[in-house]
Amino acid sequence: MSYFEQFMKANQAYVELHGNLHLPIKPKMRVAIVTCMDSRLHVAQALGLALGDAHILRNAGGRVTEDMIRSLVISQQQMGTREIVILHHTDCGAQTFTNHEFVAHLQQELGVDVQHQDFLPFTDVEESVREDMRLLKESPLIPEDVEISGAVYDVDTGKMSAVYCEEAF
């Protein structure tokens, strides 16, 4: 049985628990969380979120990219969110490579030249949170009154630690 077939079977049980909730399209808590795609990070459980509470936006490294800002703008302007949380984590895969190494790997393995692509690796997880918080604060697409916070999730303990920027937002 493939994983997809297992997922379809598991979904049958989930549907019975889910019922007909008819949740509103707008997140109840008016918050968007930018985080990593890492399978060790179950954001809803870690933050005590229920269905319909928040937008959870994920990508490799949990980095703020043009597409992440696009999603945040839609989240705010169409869905009413007024707070953003940047949530990175320890032992992230984005800490295991450099752009130069990864570009060379892709050239060798796939024959594709992506030397101008930034895959957004980092070495310091707290500094990556600060960088992303600054990017959001500096974006003309994110209103000044939107609250921006950051934290690091420890994949070994589940504990979150707040990250603060030196600059006053």
Image: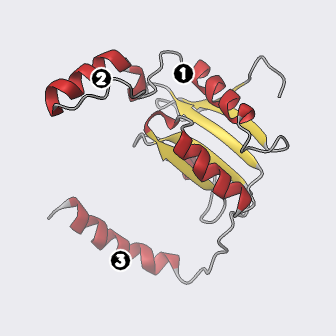
Looking at the image, residue 143 sits to the left or right of residue 102; the answer is right
Residue drawn at x 56%, y 45% is 68
Of callouts 1 and 3, the N-terminal one:
3
Amino acid marked by disc 1: Val
Q: Which residue is mark 1?
A: 125
Q: Where residue 124 appears, x then y in whole percent?
A: 53, 16
Q: Quadrant of the C terminus?
A: top right
Say whether disc 1 or disc 2 marks the residue closer to the N-terminus. 2
Q: Can you give x and y, in whole percent of width and height, for residue 43 in the image?
A: 54, 47
Where disc 3 sits, the SS reads helix
Mark 2 closeness class: few <14, some 14–19, many ≥20 residues within 10 Å: some
- Judge from the rendering whether residue 158 lies leftward or rightward of residue 10; answer left or right: right
Q: CA distance from mark 2 to mark 3?
A: 40 Å
Question: Crowding near pointer 1: few (<14 within 10 Å), some, many (20+)?
Answer: many
In the image, which is nearer the foreground, mark 2 or mark 3?
2
Q: Name the residue tied to disc 3.
A: 12
Position of residue 138 relative to residue 85, above or below, is above
Taking depth in this image into account, of 5 and 79 the one nearest to the observer is 79
Q: Position of residue 125 (x, y in %)?
A: 54, 21
Could you say which quadrant of the image residue 28 lies in? bottom right
Q: Is residue 29 visible?
A: no
| Distance between the alpha carbons at the discs numbered 1 and 2 | 19 Å
Q: Label for residue 102?
A: 2
Horizontal side, residue 83 vs residue 9: left or right? right
Residue 96, which numbered label?
Answer: none
Q: Nearer the viewer, mark 1 or mark 2?
A: 2
